[in-house]
Image: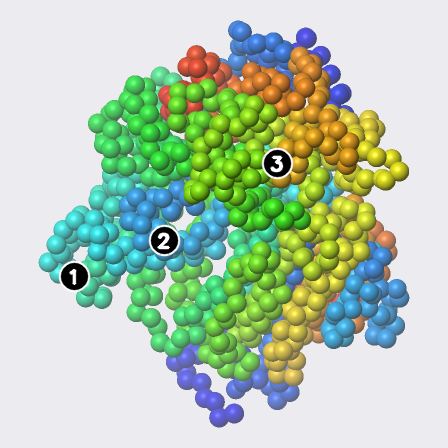
């Protein structure tokens, strides 16, 4: 590769403190890492679906690695990705069982319990009691990327009336839930418009100028407030500085697997009253895979379908076009719930295929990621938090074992899995996750290669 | 001592084992609101102060803890407030150019969520993008531009014209005159952009985009000044103006209101009342009332509700919601009417989609006000409520009753225990039962009844309406039963024969008017009432009662109360 990096380019890159995309000129001879010995970035993805599974049809029969285990009925759509997949069964959510759906979201995203909100005369509501783990990880691995983390949502029909817990996956603090992008076109614009363009837009300096004035006024306001509101404005100030950094960042060079995709036309508008879940998930996943290849971000949370949620699957056949959530509570409709899980796994397979489709040296974006796929309950029928459905895809650059079904000692803390993932992606500085009965200091060794 | 005993009885009757935090026997007070009216979350009735009225009795001479106003906390502008402000200050093209994210709901109201949420990196990016989009759209529109730039710039460096832009528009956006420092800051931002681009208008774009990102715009921030006599913070006239305006018309104060603040007209209850009454006559006030009760009745769910019945589609769902929104505004603002008539009025608003479901001839075009038969008293007998709070095919006395209990009487209901399968068995051909009978069979055991007896009797009166709100006389081939006992547990246990009896009882139930008082108060303040505001809330309620329970009386009683005009700092 006759690629020559200018000294000025490298210096500016370092000065702006923004991660550069993979440059082929910088790869080692094996294509497994940067020439300097630095591996490809590791990424963390949470792919979340609402309302759980039908456990007897979800659990693989045998456990072990490789040919020792086979995919269960519900996991059949993932056949093409079995070698990149690990299934963990037997774990329980250990936080107090306060409220179906709420407990599981907070447990799997923050390894902690929920904080019930004053209900007043309203339906039950809660927020997280801790920030979500993806945000802890983003502090460590995402600080240098253009987007510290990305939040995406496929089904729009989420429940917003029960507080932030059900509506959002990522929480920068318990009072700072991160709104997700729902429209693939908007995601494309956010990621690739103006980001990959070559010279600096003359407006950027002026925009930074505005943000400096906003920051000064925000600081002045913050100084006048009480402790709780000062913390709120900390989030605001962090947001201002992240935006300012992004505006001043160098344009990203389309090198290696990094390229600007064509602008998508797929939006998230309903078609004949139905949500375009499958195409939206596919297009978003393709954009995420390229965002990883361009190192625009390393942390993504993706809410495929909402907890409780009003999403419906019209193809589930005749009878009431009830929501998936309503079906889960109907004893006679568990077959349809299973069908919904199979559909969900088909969509998850799209996401894995998109990440596998982008090569990095001799590996793929998927290989260099840890993708956690889980839900808000084990089974929607009972709101149980036991024998939790957990899938992990990708090996986080070789740190996670794959093609495994590990059945943990029954009742093991789901947070142990989360800690393993934090360590695999974020390194040994993660010695504990969570709080209260959700807290874990014991990673699940069986998931890790070393 | 009697009060303590009653509270104990209340908890014992509730007794939904496993339904409360902390395990059996420990009651989460947030879920178990007392039966005697609005109360701050977390507070159980206590004998202290002796101010808690015995259930069923009128609180003739209640006593309360000493009044102290609530803490002042910055509220993030709600989406509607933000867009309406752009419309009013920058013009319609600017309002149309922005993309809003949904608000965060807490305690059932987005205004409460606005007091505790933080702005995140995502929000900051959106505010920035929206600020530039709005500024550019406004400046591309000749009429808006003329309004925003009240001077003819001599060139890109025209400092005095930039100053005029910043101070004129800034006053509307910040809801007060800008300080000299603020004027200089945004003038400098505008001038540097004007000089860099060689265009004055480009400079205005950056100055406006800056004002629209300033914390003085994006937060409704109140501090007041120390009132030595009271020991609290007294809100400034501009702060009162902003609070009043966002509460009543969901937008920034107009020039007349800012003028009233400047001249001291808002410093007296008379002046406040006059401005409140003026604002209540606007169409924006109707929209604000509609939006508030849209939240109270949880109508957003109609937008995604699905039913197998071919008579139900997106269009009819939208018409159902629109009908209720019109009804809220009508009862609140159209006539000097008791607002509690919301649950008894026979006025309805039908269009070509909803009329057939009511059994009426469809109007040729638009929405037609009609007088419905006396079998349709009030909002609880209208399609929007009945269809929204029903299953696909079956009705739901539980969901209908739960809304009445939680939202209209401000009484909490514990959630179902985690292991409960909340499913009414399907019809059995060998043992014919109505849905109501199957529900009663399913919930007969004590651990279900603890909660279901608090909800279902508030929903049984509406069994004569199916899952779309159409009248029906049979269910599963058996006659429907719309009779029941009103509030058998705590107040007078009165039998009702159907919706007419029931809604008349509800109309006069003091818990209903106190709950409405609390709901509108929360909307005004962006937070729950506190224990030590009990006195103020009681006075508001009494003033409302004395004024014939009209909605404007309730509003003016709230805005002239000390709770509205004072606050404390954390």
Q: Is residue B98 left or right of residue B148?
A: right
Sequence-wise, which precedes: disc 2 or disc 3?
Answer: 2
Q: In what element is the residue under mark 3?
A: loop
Furthest-left residue in this view:
B154
User: Closer to the observer: label 2 or label 3?
Assistant: 3
Task: Identify the residue shown where x is 43% and y is 43%.
Answer: B365
> Depth check: B549 or B535 in front?
B549
Q: Position of residue A410 (x, y in %)?
A: 86, 53
What residue does disc 2 label? Answer: B96
Q: Is residue A191 above or below residue B377?
A: below
Whether residue A384 appears in this view of the structure is: no
What residue does disc 3 label? Answer: B469
Q: In what element is the residue under mark 1?
A: loop
Sequence-wise, which precedes: disc 1 or disc 3?
Answer: 1
Q: Are marks 2 and 3 in contact (CB under 8 Å)?
A: no
Task: Identify the residue shown where x is 57% and y is 67%.
Answer: A284
User: Mark 2 and mark 1: span between their CA atoms?
Assistant: 28 Å
Q: Position of residue A68 (x, y in %)?
A: 88, 72
Q: Are marks 1 and 3 in contact (CB under 8 Å)?
A: no
Q: Which mark is residue A187?
A: none
The colour style of the image is rainbow
- Same subunit: marks 2 and 1: yes
Tell me which chain the residue with mark 1 is part of: B
User: Closer to the observer: label 1 or label 3?
Assistant: 3
- Same subunit: marks 2 and 3: yes
Sequence-wise, which precedes: disc 2 or disc 1?
Answer: 2
> Depth check: B448 or A362 in front?
B448
What residue does disc 1 label? Answer: B156
Q: Are marks 2 and 1 in contact (CB under 8 Å)?
A: no
């Amino acid at each position: 590769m006759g690629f020559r990096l200018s000294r000025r380019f490298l210096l500016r890159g370092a000065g702006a403190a923004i991660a550069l995309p993979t440059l082929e000129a910088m790869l080692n001879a094996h294509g497994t890492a940067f020439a300097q010995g630095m591996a490809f970035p590791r990424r963390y993805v949470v792919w979340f679906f609402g309302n759980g599974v039908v456990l007897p049809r979800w659990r693989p029969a045998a456990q072990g690695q490789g040919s020792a285990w086979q995919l269960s009925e519900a996991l059949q759509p993932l056949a093409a990705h079995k070698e990149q997949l690990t299934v963990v069964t037997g774990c329980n959510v250990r936080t107090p069982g306060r409220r179906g759906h709420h407990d599981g979201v907070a447990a799997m995203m923050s390894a902690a319990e929920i904080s019930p909100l004053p209900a007043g005369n309203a339906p039950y509501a809660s927020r997280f009691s801790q920030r979500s783990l993806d945000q802890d990880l983003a502090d460590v691995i995402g600080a240098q990327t253009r987007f510290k983390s990305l939040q995406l949502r496929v089904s729009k029909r989420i429940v917003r009336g029960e507080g932030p817990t059900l509506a959002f996956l990522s929480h920068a603090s318990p009072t700072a839930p991160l709104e997700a992008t729902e429209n693939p076109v908007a995601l494309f614009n956010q990621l690739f418009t103006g980001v990959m363009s070559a010279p600096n837009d003359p407006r950027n300096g002026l925009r930074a100028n505005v943000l400096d004035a906003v920051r000064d006024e925000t600081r002045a306001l913050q100084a006048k407030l009480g402790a709780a509101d000062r913390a709120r404005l900390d989030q605001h100030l962090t947001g201002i500085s992240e935006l300012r950094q992004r505006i001043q960042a160098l344009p990203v060079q389309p090198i290696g697997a990094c390229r600007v995709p064509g602008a998508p036309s797929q939006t998230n508008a309903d078609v004949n009253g139905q949500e375009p879940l499958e195409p939206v998930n596919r297009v978003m996943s393709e954009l995420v895979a390229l965002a990883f290849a361009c190192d625009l971000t390393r942390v993504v949370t993706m809410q495929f379908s909402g907890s409780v949620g009003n999403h419906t699957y019209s193809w589930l056949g005749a009878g009431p076009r009830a929501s998936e959530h309503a079906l889960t509570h109907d004893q006679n409709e568990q077959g349809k719930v299973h069908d919904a899980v199979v559909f969900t796994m088909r969509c998850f397979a799209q996401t894995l295929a998109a990440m596998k489709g982008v090569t990095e040296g001799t590996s793929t974006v998927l290989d260099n990621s840890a993708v956690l796929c889980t839900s808000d309950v084990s089974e929607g029928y009972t709101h149980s938090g036991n024998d939790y459905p957990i899938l992990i895809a990708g090996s986080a650059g070789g740190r996670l074992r794959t093609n495994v079904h590990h059945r943990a000692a029954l009742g093991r803390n789901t947070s142990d899995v989360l800690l393993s993932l934090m360590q695999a992606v974020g390194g040994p500085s993660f010695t504990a996750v969570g709080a209260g009965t959700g807290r874990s200091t014991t990673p699940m060794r069986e998931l890790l290669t070393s | 001592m009697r009060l303590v005993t009653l509270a104990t009885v209340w908890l014992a009757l509730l007794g939904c084992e496993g339904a409360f935090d902390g395990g059996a026997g420990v009651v989460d007070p947030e879920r178990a609101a007392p039966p005697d009216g609005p109360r701050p979350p977390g507070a159980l009735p206590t004998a202290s102060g002796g101010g808690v009225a015995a259930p069923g009795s009128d609180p003739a001479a209640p006593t309360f803890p000493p009044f102290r106003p609530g803490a002042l906390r910055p509220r993030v502008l709600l989406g509607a407030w933000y867009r309406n402000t752009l419309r009013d200050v920058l013009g319609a093209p600017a309002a149309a150019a922005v993309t809003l994210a949904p608000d965060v709901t807490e305690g059932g109201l987005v205004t409460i969520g606005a007091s505790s949420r933080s702005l995140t990196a995502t929000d900051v990016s959106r505010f920035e993008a929206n600020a530039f989009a709005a500024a550019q759209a406004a400046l591309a529109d000749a009429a808006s531009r003329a309004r925003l730039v009240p001077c003819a710039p001599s060139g890109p460096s025209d400092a005095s014209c930039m100053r005029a832009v910043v101070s004129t528009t800034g006053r509307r956006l910040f809801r007060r005159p800008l300080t000299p420092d603020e004027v200089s800051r945004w003038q400098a931002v505008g001038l540097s952009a004007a000089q860099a681009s060689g265009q004055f208008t480009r400079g205005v774009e950056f100055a406006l985009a800056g004002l629209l990102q300033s914390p003085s715009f994006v937060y409704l921030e109140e501090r007041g000044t120390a009132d030595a006599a009271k020991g609290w913070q007294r809100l400034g006239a501009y702060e009162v103006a902003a609070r009043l305006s966002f509460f009543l018309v969901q937008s920034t104060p107009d020039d007349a209101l800012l003028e009233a603040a400047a001249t001291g007209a808002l410093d007296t209850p008379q002046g406040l009342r006059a401005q409140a009454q003026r604002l209540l006559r606007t169409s924006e006030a109707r929209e604000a009332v509609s939006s508030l009760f849209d939240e109270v009745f949880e109508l957003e769910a109609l937008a995604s509700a699905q039913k197998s019945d071919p008579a139900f589609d997106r269009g009819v769902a939208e018409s159902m919601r629109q009908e209720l929104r019109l009804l809220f505004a009508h009862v609140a603002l159209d006539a000097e009417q008791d607002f509690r008539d919301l649950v008894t009025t026979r006025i309805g608003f039908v269009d070509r989609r909803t009329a057939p479901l009511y059994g009426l001839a469809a109007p040729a075009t638009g929405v037609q006000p009609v007088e419905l038969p006396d079998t349709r008293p009030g909002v609880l007998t209208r399609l929007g409520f009945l269809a929204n709070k029903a299953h696909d095919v079956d009705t739901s006395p539980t969901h209908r009753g739960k809304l009445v209990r939680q939202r209209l009487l401000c009484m909490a209901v514990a959630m179902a225990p985690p292991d409960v399968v909340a499913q009414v068995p399907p019809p059995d051909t060998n043992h014919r039962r109505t849905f109501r009978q199957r529900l009663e069979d399913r919930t007969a055991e004590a651990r279900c009844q603890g909660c279901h007896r608090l909800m279902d009797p508030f929903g049984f009166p509406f069994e004569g309406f199916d899952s779309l709100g159409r009248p029906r006389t049979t269910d599963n081939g058996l006659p429907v039963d719309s009779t029941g006992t009103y509030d058998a547990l705590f107040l007078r246990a009165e039998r009702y024969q159907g919706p007419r009896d029931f809604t008349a009882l509800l109309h006069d139930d003091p818990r209903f008017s106190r709950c409405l008082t609390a709901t509108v108060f929360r909307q005004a303040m962006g937070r729950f009432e506190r224990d030590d505001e009990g006195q103020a809330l009681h006075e508001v309620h009494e003033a409302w009662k004395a004024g014939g329970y009209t909605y404007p009386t309730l509003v003016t009683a709230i805005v002239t109360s000390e709770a509205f005009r004072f606050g404390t700092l954390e």
